[in-house]
Amino acid sequence: MAISHTTLDQIKQSGVLHVLTRTDPTTYYQSAEGDAGLEYDLITLFAKHLGVKVKIEVPNTFDEILSKIAEGKADIAAAGLTLTEARKKTMRFAPAYYEVTEQLIYRSGTRRPIDIDSLSNGILEVTKGTSHVDSLSQLKQTNYPLNWAENEQLDTDGLLYLVNAGLIDYTVADSNQATLIRRFYPKLNIAFDISTARQLAWALSPSNDTSLYDEVVVFFNRIKADKTLDQLLEKHYGHTNSLSYVDNCQFRQHQKTRLPTYQYNFNVAALLYDIDWRLLAAIGYQESHWLANAESSHGVQGIMMLTEDTADFLNIKDRTDPVQSIDGGARYFKQRLNIISDKIPQPDRTWFALASYNVGMGHLEDARRLTELQGGNPDKWVDVKQRLPLLTEEKWHQQTKHGYARGDEPVRYVENIRSYYDLLVWLTEENQIQNDAMAIKTPPESEAVYDLK
C-alpha cells in the first residue's frame, strides 16, 4: 500500500504537531492553572482538530522563530506574528485572526512625545527581528531623524519592563501587547501609533506542499464561522480595559496595606471550597475594597457584602465579622458555581457564577434566554454579556420571567473581578519578565552590557 508523504499526513502519522511560539501574555505563558495564552488556546484547538498532540518549542530569540519556520524546522509558528510583505517572501501566512497597530510606549512622569521628531533626545529600543524594526526603518526613509537600538536578548515584554522602570525611554509594542501589559505596569503610556493596522497570523514554511496550510485555512474558517475565535478573543482581551489608571494604582496600594489582614481567611476559605484564593480576594475587593465594616445603601454588609437574606440562608450571625463574611461569600459563590450547568465549560462557568452572585440566577437566566432568542450562544459569556444590559429596557425585560434588572452592573462586576484576579496572579507569582530584563540590564561587573550598535 502506498504511503502518503504530504506534510499533513506525516503529522497525523507521527501524532505530533511541532509549534514555535514565544512567552508573552498575548501568546503563551504559564498561569496558575497551567499553560495559557491566546496562541496556546488556538494551537490546542487545531491539534484537537487534527487528532494529534502538540510539541511546543520556545526559541531563545524572536529572530530564531522566524528563521526556523522559514527553514521548515517546525510545522507552525504561532507567535503573534505580524503579516508583512518582507516576511511573505520567506514564509506562508495563514488567515489573519487579529488586527493591531504598532504603538510607541513611554513612561508616565516623563514628557509625552507628540511625534517622531520628539524622540531625538531619548533611548529607543526594539526587539531585533520584529516588524517594529521594519516600521521604524520605513519612517527613517521618509527623512525622520530616527535612531534606535535593536535588542537581541529581550523580547518586547522585557523592553516594556525597562520603560516602566525608567531604564530606557521608549519602545514599540503591538496594541494588544500594550493593552495587556499596561494592567501590570500602570506607569506605561501610549504616545501614538507608528503604523497603520497590521494583521496577526500563523506562519508556515514556504514549501510547495500546501496540505497543512489548506487544513489551517479550513480550521480558521470554522472557528470564525462558529464564533469560537470571538469567544477566545473575549476570554483574553474582553476585560482588559475595565480598570482606570487610578483604580489600578489604588488596588496595588490596598493589596499591600489591606489584603495582608485577611490573607489567612481567604486562604482557609479557598482550601475549604476548592477555589483559588485570589479569585475570592478579587470578589472581596470588588464588593468592599477589603473593608470589614463596609455597608451599602441597600443594606449589604461586610467584606463580601452579603445581604441579610443571604446571611440568614448561610447561617452567618455577623456579616461584619471578616471570618464569617469571607467563609460565607466563598460558600455562596461555590453554590452559584455548582448551579451553573456542567455543559458550560470554563472559564465561562466562572463568569456566569460571578454574574449570578451579583444580579441573581433568575436575571442571568433571563439574559441567557434573550441571547438564544437573538441567535447568540447562551452558554458563552461573550454573547450573554451583550444581552444583560437589555434587562434595563422595557422592550426586552417585559419579555422575561424576572423583569427589570440593572443588567450593566453584572457585566462591569465580572470584568472588574477578572482584572483584579489577573493583577493578583501577577503580583503574587514570580515575575519572570522582570527577572529576565534586570539580568540583562545589570550583568556582573566582568560582563559588558549588550551591544547597542
Image (tube, grey):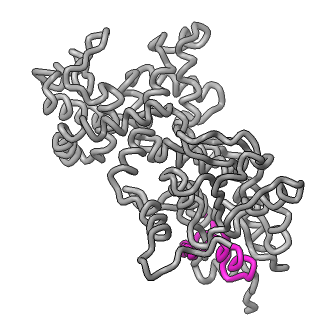
Q: Please determine whether, in this image, residue 82 is positioned above or below residue 374.
A: below
* Residue closest to the far right: 142
For the point 64% across and 44% down, which residue is it?
Answer: 230
**Visible in this render: residue 199?**
yes
Position in image of residue 98 (x %, y %) = 70, 50
**Visible in this render: residue 8?**
no
The one nearer the camera, 359 or 211, is 359
Q: Please determine whether, in this image, residue 106 is positioned above or below residue 50.
A: above
* Residue closest to the far left: 317
For the point 30% across and 25% down, which residue is it?
Answer: 288
The one nearer the camera, 294 or 310, is 294
Q: Which residues are magenta?
A: 49-77
Position in image of residue 117 (x %, y %) = 77, 47
For the point 62% across and 68% down, which residue is it?
Answer: 151
Quadrant in which residue 419 is drawn: top left
Q: Is 54 covered by the magenta stretch? A: yes
Quadrant in which residue 375 is drawn: top right
Position in image of residue 27 (x %, y %) = 57, 59
